[in-house]
Amino acid sequence: MRTARHRTLPHARRIAMLSAAAVTGLTLALGTVAAPAQAQSLAPQTDDEAKRMIKDRQAEDSSSLNKSNVPEGVSVEQAKEAVDKSDEITASDVEYAAALEDLPDSGVPEEFYKTPEQLPTENGGVVKQTPSKFYLDPVKLIEHSAKSTTYMYKTTDEKGTARAATATLLTPEGASEQAKDAVVISPGTQGIADKCAPSRQMGMGTEYEGVSVTSALAAKRPVIVVDYLGLGTEGTHHYVNRVEEGRSVLDAAKAVQNVEGSGINGDTKLQLRGYSQGGHATTAALELADDWAPGLNIASASAGAVPTDLYKTVTEMSSTYTAFLLYGVASFADQTDVDLSKYLNQKGLDAVESASNQCTLEATLSHAFTDTTTLTKDGSPLQELVETEFRDVVDNQRLGRAEIPDIPVLVNHSRLDDIIPFEMGKELASTWCDAGNKVAFEDNLGPGHVGGYIAALPRVETFTNRTFAGKAPLDSCWRL
């Protein structure tokens, strides 16, 4: 563990090496070094800006990595191999992960995340709220000007148990006192440990979704960032569980109407938005909306790189992303009461425990290119364990088979996505078209999963502005 006296120089050095294109982690963590006045321009606003960010990222190599700028538990050789073998992990990502190790807490009191003995009767009932912070960098040089409030609300897990969850409301300077519209962001994969909750990471400057949040705030409308059930609060976070994700999103959107000073009420138009796991959660929320939250004023939705078929995604996943598979195995085992010690050797059990306590980037670097046949007692890959023991719970997370509200929806996906197959995005858009929905399908050539996210951002904002203004978005159904 690095001590406090070692903190200043490594942080300055690490952060200085981060470019605006240093998108960290498996599902896009982003570090920045802009001045405060530039905070709202960190996200690409045009396709050309997105292309420049992607080009900057591709230009990075592993030559700058050494013992001083690689995370604890990851060797220099491992880090360099991850950078050299993958388009998704760069030297700046590794530097960023190392910079996170010595950070102070998020500023939200730990006591705040404890569930009280009594919860509200209604789902979406507010339990409590507290002022919080939103920093755009992990050395806390850039605090966003938006007012930040973290709140706890009541929701219900898949088994019908009342649970507490948290979310963060960000209100930009210059926003109307009464919000006409607001964006609800479902974040991409954070990890499954409490410390990885977006409300915690935003106060530490380590939340990679900061680029999407900043992009949405630039339009002077409130933004709600959901933590998901079991992230931050007590109880287990069931990774990519469609019911619990969807309810978390919908109940956060209901609860924000009763957060003091939110300026959001039943007339406020809402857009649900997310990419990767966030796209999964957004789609799940749409499928649950009519039954779970029929009164919500959802005006549009944007779902990017949605893993509609979790089984196919997991079984075809590259070894670069073993951390995702470990998250899944830990979560699936918890949901099915499977004893992993029956199937995993000590190395495998240690790998699951390690990943379960790491947020996305650190877990990715620590477990990239792991041969999962070395983790099981019988020498079979982890994917086979998913097939034999977890197939039912995985299949229960399938999306694209239920009706969604009659609203404009945007589906975006890179043709070069190396985590979520492009065909899943196109099939989801086609399914919604066949059901009579108004669908804009935006494909792009952003390299890999992260590149697709960056390339999609300008188009997401254009779609958002048009739908909130009551204008018809592009209809792609004729070509799907």
Image (cartoon, rainbow, N blue to C red):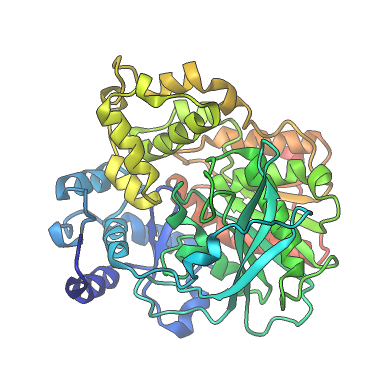
Q: Quadrant of residue 29?
A: bottom left
Q: Which residue is painted at 67% across and 39% down in the image?
A: 243
Q: Is residue 256 left or right of residue 25?
A: right
Q: Is residue 65 left or right of residue 425?
A: left
Is 303 drawn above or below residue 205 in the view shown? above
Q: Position of residue 369 (x, y in %)?
A: 28, 35
Is 396 drawn above or below residue 476 in the view shown? above
Taking depth in this image into account, of 395 and 17 the one nearest to the observer is 395
Q: Is residue 235 left or right of residue 14?
A: right
Q: Position of residue 427 (x, y in %)?
A: 65, 33
Quarter of the image with the C terminus in it: top right
Quarter of the image with the N terminus in it: bottom left
Taking depth in this image into account, of 363 and 470 the one nearest to the observer is 363
Is 286 drawn above or below residue 13 in the view shown? above
Is 397 drawn above or below residue 345 in the view shown? below
Q: Which residue is painted at 38% across and 80% down in the image?
A: 141
